[in-house]
Image (spheres, rainbow, N blue to C red):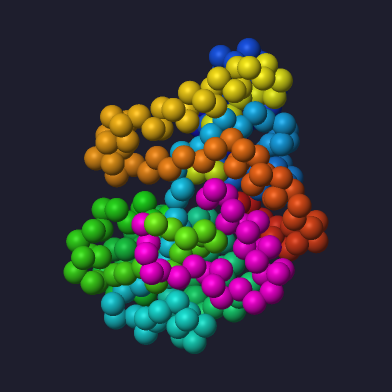
Amino acid sequence: MPQGAGIASANFLQGPAPRDGLVFGSFTRNYPNQAIMRQANVEGDPRQLNWLAATSFPSRVCIVSSTAKVKTASDLFKYELIVGGGPGVSSSNSIMPTVFNRVLGTKFRVITGYKGAQDAVLAIERGELDGVCASSAQFRPYKQQFSEGKVRVIMHAEESSMPDLPGIPSIYDFVQTAEQRQFLRFVFLSAEFGRPYAFPPGVPRDRVELMRRAIAETLKDADLVAEAAKMELDMSFRSADHLEKVVADLYETPPALIERVKELVPDIR
């Protein structure tokens, strides 16, 4: 059920899906945010799902060309950085720089119309752009450009430290107020969900616990871990307890702040 970036799958779990423990689903990591923002195509309450676990902890980063005037994350507050965005403000490549500008005062200039990170990197090579912000996984095909110093990561958007990005600052290092931090958390905390898995509401507790243990044990399997590493597939484990806490934290966001998010990013995808 891929429709709506997996929203159809999430809605099915919340609605007609059997409650016998034989049906579980995976869907967009933005589903809790979308539900809280009351997006029209979202049904149900993510707090009612039986979260099982998640794999992956995708870091979102901003990269710059070696020729860009911006050399460090601090420079984003001093100099304009021309970056590639998607078709609109709600596209994934546009959200990060747009939010950073409005909330923290960075000086990104977003040029919309690029289909994704691949198009933007090609535009960087042509000298059309200074950089782009996207999930770090999207830059895996460009190892040579990174190793040759043509492009490099200057910051990431996660509050947690990222083991695969030692020494790279977080945008949260530049937060000055509690409201700024809360705004960024609401927009970007979805990374904590990675690739989530959930049972529908109402599944018997013993079956929920069985599946939670099964997923946790599977992700410790040496053969699976080795195969994932060979494929460069992030299998970072996120427990059900962790996912439940993240959902609860999102629901603590003040309504007024959620309205501000909806004005800036009306359709988180």
Nearest the camera: 53 or 44? 53
How many badges with numbers are in the image?
Answer: 0
Confirm whether residue 256 shows in the render. yes
Please provide percent x and percent y for residue 116.
40, 55
Q: Residue at x 45, y 70 (%)?
A: 169
Q: Position of residue 74 (x, y in %)?
A: 47, 81
Magenta-highlighted residues: 164-192
**Residue 106: horizontal and vertical position, in percent?**
54, 78
Task: Kindly tell me whether residue 264 is visible in this rendering.
Answer: no
Work out whether 41 lies above or below 24. below
Q: Vertical placement of 194 versus 16: above or below?
A: below
Query: Does residue 23 appear to the left or right of 55 in the view shown?
Result: right
Give the residue at x 52% y 59%. Answer: 160
Residue 163 image-quadrant placement: bottom left
Residue nearest the observer in this picture, 114 or 207: 207
Question: Does the segment drawn in magenta span residue 97?
Answer: no
Q: Is residue 75 left or right of residue 37?
A: left
Left or right: residue 170 compared with residue 46: left
- The residue under the point 57% across, 49% down is 190
Where, by quadrant of the figure, is residue 198 drawn?
top right
Q: Is residue 187 magenta?
A: yes
Q: Main secondary structure of the magenta part?
A: helix
x, y percent for residue 158: 51, 60
Q: Quadrant of residue 135?
A: bottom left
Is 111 situated above or below 164?
below
